[in-house]
């Protein structure tokens, strides 16, 4: 299965959530993650490959800008149109308060002398630190959802999880 975490950007809070899901991030050391705040990855327009989980599922992040919900639905609808088996693609929105501030700060990368990158990192660090527990909670729910979809847990029925 492919797990696609979408948000306003793919290299900020979604990237942190993906690493928390994969359980390969020491507590609150998200600023050291490979690809964190890397606007060249964001500007490529391609999903960022984060790695594989313990079930062999590929985990990606993708930034959709201000229209996360619409973009998520569009990807889901398109995958259905082209015949992707719904059990092979899990699209999960990672939303946090301040995500639009992170997105706006990421647009300052045009500023010279690294000022834009500094603004990007300062805003992202502040908001993600403030919302870290929420992101961690989202990652924990994703762990449970994927375990359920993989048939690993019998005691997780009724939690309302669904693909897409």
Image: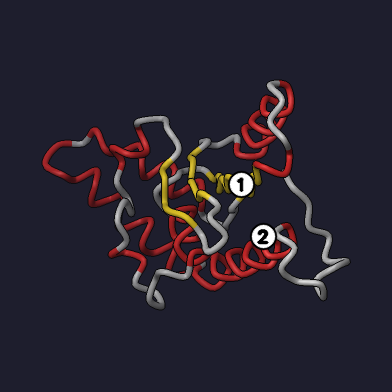
Residue 153 is left or right of residue 133, and the answer is right
Q: Write down the residue under mark 1.
A: 1
Image quarter in which the C terminus is found: top right
| Residue at image point 72% right, 25% down | 83
Residue identifier under label 2: 146
> Is 17 left or right of 149, judged from the image as shown?
left
Disc with the residue nearer the chain's start (2 vs 1): 1
Dot 2 lies on which element? helix
Is mark 2 in CB contact (under 8 Å) with mark 1?
yes
Instruction: Point out residue 127 in the picture as x, y percentages from the top left corner.
Output: 44, 62
Front one among 144 and 99: 144
Dot 2 crowding, Cα within 10 Å, few <14, some 14–19, many 20+: many
Residue 155, placed above or below residue 19? below
At 64% from the left and 62% from the top, the residue drawn is 142
Mark 1 lies on a secondary structure that is loop
Q: Residue at x 54, y 73 (%)?
A: 133
The Cα atoms of the two marked residues, 2 and 1, are separated by 10 Å
Q: Nearer the viewer, mark 2 or mark 1?
A: 1
Residue 147 is situated, as x and y percent measured from the top left of the image, at: 68, 65
**Residue 41 placement, left or right of 94:** left
């Amino acid at each position: 299965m492919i797990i696609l975490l979408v948000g306003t950007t793919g290299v900020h809070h979604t990237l942190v959530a993906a690493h928390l899901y994969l359980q390969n991030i020491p507590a609150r050391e998200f600023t050291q993650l490979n690809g964190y705040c890397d606007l060249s990855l964001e500007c490529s327009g391609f999903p960022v490959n984060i790695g594989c989980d313990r079930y062999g599922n590929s985990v990606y992040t993708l930034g959709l800008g201000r229209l996360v919900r619409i973009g998520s639905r569009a990807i889901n609808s398109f995958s259905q149109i082209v015949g992707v088996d719904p059990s092979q693609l899990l699209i999960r929105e990672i939303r946090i308060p301040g995500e639009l501030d992170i997105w706006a700060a990421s647009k300052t990368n045009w500023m010279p002398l690294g000022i834009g990158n500094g603004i990007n990192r300062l805003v992202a660090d502040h908001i993600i630190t403030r919302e870290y527990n929420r992101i961690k909670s989202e990652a924990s729910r994703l762990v449970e959802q994927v375990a359920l979809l993989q048939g690993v847990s019998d005691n997780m029925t009724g939690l309302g999880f669904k693909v897409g």
